[in-house]
């Protein structure tokens, strides 16, 4: 049962990272833990392009996505929606009992800055949720343009999901004015799932201090208080923190710029291959993700049969379409540790499987 994932999360984890996790436990209130936590801050802040603290949450990303709403929304939140994860965020806000509205776009269409401006101008909102890279349909919105709009509404706290784009391209938190920036371990960081990493602006902490009902587990003020002593509020997932430390070393060794260029290049390799086959990029032209490609299944390939053969004969797995796109689109991840060699091996295998299924 050994195969390699090319789905957009969780993704393949290197042997080095797996070995890093297999170290003896340390107490989470020990000086060893404090040293480990504090040693990672400069590298994390560099990747977030921020001077604000970077917190570690033992949860999947959704924990912090939900927690952020509970920390900063007093009046009403506007949820920008253009795919499965962003659609769900509105549902989550409503389940938290918050006043919330959706700014809706078709799946695969980017969030439109002019529409965002018009809706915020109604003055109803004190927070916005925004997904940079909608993994479900491979659509990457223009974050700088959207943040330029948000900077004109200083009373609105921005909660930005960079879960599947973080570390694959520069996202300049402080320069763009992002208040809450969230990522997760199992996407481009190529760690196992279970750790969410996020950074919160001073403005957002000040807002949180005036909000009741923040709860405990995701309370920003608890994260800040513990951060000041180099710790997390509760017992964290220490093996994943070892893995993160190891990955930060990898990123430093490769160089962030080289890492960004590698993601862009491999993304284009996959895109060119699929377009040459006759598939069409699913998201709007110019808004394709750099960490994955979502293609419309224009050749009407049996994606279940494709994945079955790809897995059993070649040991690879791609995604056969998320939610309502199941069978209608497929996604291939190029995030994390992929190289020209691993992507070439996947495409060679896909060529063989497509030929076997009778697709040229
Ligand atoms: C994967 C993903 C999530 C959800 O992350 P979990 O770790 O499953 O909670 C949210 N948003 C985006 C854009 C994602 O890609």
Image: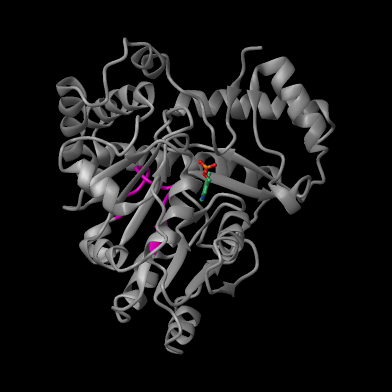
Who is closer to the viewer here, 54 or 131? Answer: 54
The kind of secondary structure the magenta stretch mainly shows is loop
Question: How many numbered marks have been drawn onto this rendered protein structure?
Answer: 0
* Residue at x 31%, y 53% (from the top left corner): 220
Residue 354 in the image: above or below residue 160: above
User: What is the x, y in percent for residue 100?
Assistant: 54, 73
What is the quadrant of the C terminus in the image?
top right
User: What is the x, y in percent for residue 259?
Assistant: 32, 37
Residue 301 in the image: above or below residue 339: below
Residue 250 is one of the magenta-drawn residues: no
- The image quarter containing residue 121 is bottom left
Who is closer to the viewer here, 181 or 56? Answer: 56
What is the quadrant of the N terminus in the image?
top right
User: What is the x, y in percent for residue 292?
Assistant: 53, 44
Who is closer to the viewer here, 19 or 285? Answer: 19
Left or right: residue 350 compared with residue 172: right
Q: Which residues are magenta?
A: 159-171
Residue 339 in the image: above or below residue 334: above
* Residue at x 48%, y 31% (from the top left corner): 193
- Tell me if residue 164 can be seen: no
Left or right: residue 190 compared with residue 100: left
- Tell me if residue 247 can be seen: yes
Left or right: residue 31 compared with residue 307: left
Who is closer to the viewer here, 154 or 12? Answer: 154
Left or right: residue 183 compared with residue 309: left
Residue 139 in the image: above or below residue 196: below
- The image quarter containing residue 253 is top left
User: What is the x, y in percent for residue 103?
Assistant: 56, 74
């Amino acid at each position: 049962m050994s195969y390699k994932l090319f789905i957009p999360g969780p993704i393949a984890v290197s042997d080095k990272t797996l070995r890093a996790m297999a170290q003896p436990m340390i107490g989470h209130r020990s000086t060893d833990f404090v040293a480990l936590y504090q040693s990672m801050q400069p590298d994390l802040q560099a990747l977030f392009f921020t001077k604000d603290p970077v917190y570690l949450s033992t949860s999947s990303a959704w924990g912090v996505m939900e927690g952020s709403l509970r920390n900063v929304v007093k009046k009403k939140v506007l949820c920008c929606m253009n795919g499965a994860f962003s659609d769900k965020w509105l549902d989550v806000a409503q389940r938290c009992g918050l006043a919330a509205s959706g700014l809706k776009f078709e799946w695969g269409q980017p969030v439109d800055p002019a529409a965002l401006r018009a809706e915020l101008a109604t003055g109803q909102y004190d927070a916005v949720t925004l997904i940079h890279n909608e993994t479900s349909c491979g659509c990457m919105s223009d974050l700088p343009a959207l943040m330029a709009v948000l900077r004109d509404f200083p009373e609105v706290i921005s909660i930005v999901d960079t879960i599947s784009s973080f570390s694959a391209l520069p996202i300049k938190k402080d320069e763009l004015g992002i208040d809450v920036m969230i990522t997760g371990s199992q996407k481009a960081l190529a760690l196992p799932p279970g750790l969410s990493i996020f950074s919160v602006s001073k403005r957002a902490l000040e807002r949180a201090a005036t909000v009741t009902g923040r709860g405990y587990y995701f309370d920003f003020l608890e994260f800040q208080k513990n951060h000041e002593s180099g710790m997390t509020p509760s017992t964290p997932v220490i093996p994943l923190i070892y893995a993160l430390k190891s990955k930060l070393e990898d990123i430093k060794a490769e160089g962030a710029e080289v890492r960004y260029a590698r993601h862009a290049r491999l993304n284009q390799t996959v895109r060119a291959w699929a377009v040459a086959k006759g598939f069409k990029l699913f998201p709007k032209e110019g808004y394709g993700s750099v960490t994955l490609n979502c293609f419309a299944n224009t050749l009407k390939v049996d994606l279940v049969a494709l994945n079955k053969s790809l897995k059993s004969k070649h040991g690879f797995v791609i995604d056969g379409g998320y939610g309502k796109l199941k069978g209608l689109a497929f996604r291939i991840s190029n995030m994390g540790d992929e190289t020209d060699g691993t992507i070439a091996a996947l495409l060679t295998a896909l060529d063989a499987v497509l030929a076997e299924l009778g697709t040229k």
